[in-house]
Image (spheres, rainbow, N blue to C red):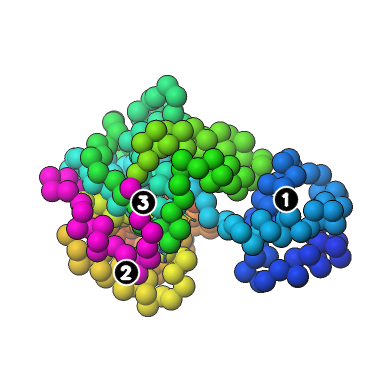
Amino acid sequence: MQVVGSPTLQAFLLSLPEHKRQPNLFFAAIRWVVGDVPAANNLPNIVENKGQEIAEVMFARSTQTNEPARCAVLLPLLASLPQPLALLEVGASAGLCLFPDRYAYDYDGTSVGLKEDGPVFQCSVSGAVPVPPELPEVVWRAGLDLNPLDIGSSDARDWLATLVWPEHAERRKRLLRAMDVVAQNPPLLVQGDVRDGLPNLLEQMPDGATPVVFHSAVLSYVADQVEREEFARDMLARDVVWISNESPRVFPSITDKVKGEPPRGKFLLSMNGEPKAWTGPHGQSIQWIDQTDGA
Ligand SMILES: C[S@@+](CC[C@H](N)C(=O)[O-])C[C@H]1O[C@@H](n2cnc3c(N)ncnc32)[C@H](O)[C@@H]1O
């Protein structure tokens, strides 16, 4: 309301190219410049005085996030596979989701992999979720991204933390802990596009481990549905386990296998094109899909 009702804020946003007028980017840039969460009624004043700096941040950066809590919804599938695993993540960002074996989880009171220093991701479960008794074993991991983020850079770390909404204090704390874990031993991250960058990395996957290609909140950025379906066909044709955790709109052919409307605001977790669970978009919940719900 403060933005809509303020001619100063409206004029500022309209001065930016359309793809830079995102609310998340705007508010994160303000926090980056001001170093704090300002009162909403102070926003016009801040923009009048620091508009140039805020615009520079908005031009230089994007809302590229990395949510390691999504490992909580990937874990039941990863742990169900023959171990050990080789993990290849598409759209890995800073690679925080490549470390499901280094975090701890709390599934409605059932603990998995309790560690002293790392983050503990809370995930509420419903339905017959196969909560694993132990963590999977990962022997190889690599990520592909249009713009891989270097977790060793304090600038990248600070920006990732700034992108977490200010009221999500616990989420930010867990993100910081996950970044500490990953920074100790950063993964191989390669710059490339999901549409043509995978073959080179697939060739590097070691023998003797179950090869898993996964992605979470990525394929929606491939706007062309034909290209998404081509990617899906390619995954199904390869000798890999393909795990997708995306909005149900991304692969209608998979979503249509579940009876009824997708629950609002959930992602669809699938394995090799078969729907498995509805998941909270930040990994905060997992609702197993009853196989008898299949269409
Ligand atoms: C919302 S972030 C999700 C990051 C991570 N998968 C997670 O769950 O936290 C989307 C990521 O996908 C990457 N991305 C978008 N389009 C891509 C493409 N065509 N090829 C490779 N990466 C892409 C972005 O750079 C960004 O890092």
Give the residue type that dot 1 points to. Answer: Ile
Q: Residue at x 73, y 55 (%)?
A: 53
Apparent side of residue 251 relative to residue 208 in the rendered image (left or right): right
Q: Which stretch is magenta?
A: 188-210
Q: Which residue is mark 3?
A: 189
Residue 68, position as x, y percentages in the image: 45, 43
> Which mark, by number, is residue 196?
2
The amino acid marked with disc number 2 is Asp
Task: Please tell me whether residue 185 is drawn above or below residue 98 in the rendered image.
Answer: above
Answer whether residue 188 is visible to the viewer in this image: yes
Q: Amino acid at mark 3?
A: Leu
Say what secondary structure mark 1 lies in.
helix
Q: CA distance from mark 2 to mark 1?
A: 36 Å
The answer to whether the beta carbon of the residue marked 3 is less than 8 Å from any atom of ligand 1 is no
Return the x and y of residue 80 as percentages of the image width and height. Answer: 24, 42
Name the element at disc 3: strand
